[in-house]
Image: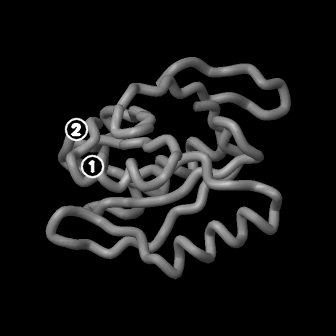
Amino acid sequence: MHIEFEVYEEMLSSVLRALPSEAVGFLAGPGGSSATRCRPLIAHSGPHGAIADIRDQYEAEKSFAEMGLRSVAIFHSHPEGCSHLSELDRHYGSIRDETQIVIALQGARIVAVEAYSNSCGRVASVPISVFWPEDGVASGRY
């Protein structure tokens, strides 16, 4: 998963702004595994975590399509939790063929950012590289 630096920073900022609640959002790009846009989503708290507002999700994907982009990853936070996928995360991840990014926090401190693919019910770790779009240089794995 390749994420532009500003997109990565926006994703992390949206997670911190949502505290103490979970954050949910999309990363979009021209295809493949490169993210060039971040779109936080309205999230509704439920008994098992946050669920993205379906109308907001539709509007985000419509906006991406108008820009010639598509959703390449879904991110969400685990306040006071770990960076692993929960059973519910695995279930939702099996519905969409996109990378899932989990941001773990302890208080207002981000302690881990992990990405996973969930293809055909098999979960695998996906490396994340953050890059500056003007020179394409990666800043390293996060």
Out of 15 and 39, give the one closest to the viewer: 39
User: Looking at this rendering, what residue extends furthest in the bottom direction?
Assistant: 55
Pick the front one: 133 or 65: 65
Q: Residue at x 22, y 38 (%)?
A: 82
In the rendered structure, the answer to whether residue 29 lies left or right of residue 75 reads: right
Image coordinates of residue 61 in percent, x first then y, are 64, 67
Q: CA distance from mark 1 to mark 2?
A: 6 Å
Q: Is residue 142 above or below residue 21?
A: above
Above or below 64: residue 107: above
**What amino acid is labelled 2 in the image?**
Cys
Q: How many marks?
A: 2
Residue 135 lies, in percent from the top left, at 83, 25
- Callout 2 secondary element: loop
Q: Nearer the viewer, residue 41 or 98?
A: 98
Q: Residue at x 43, y 42 (%)?
A: 101
Q: Residue at x 15, y 69 (%)?
A: 47
Residue annotated with mark 1: 78
Density class for disc 2 (Cα within 10 Å; few <14, some 14-19, many ≥20) is some
Q: Are marks 1 and 2 in contact (CB under 8 Å)?
A: yes
**Left or right: where does residue 103 sit relative to residue 88?**
right
Which image quarter: residue 86? top left
For the N terminus, the quadrant is top right
- For label 2, the residue is 82
Task: Please report the residue visible at 44 percent of the width from the left and 37 percent of the height from the top.
Answer: 119
Residue extending farthest front: 120
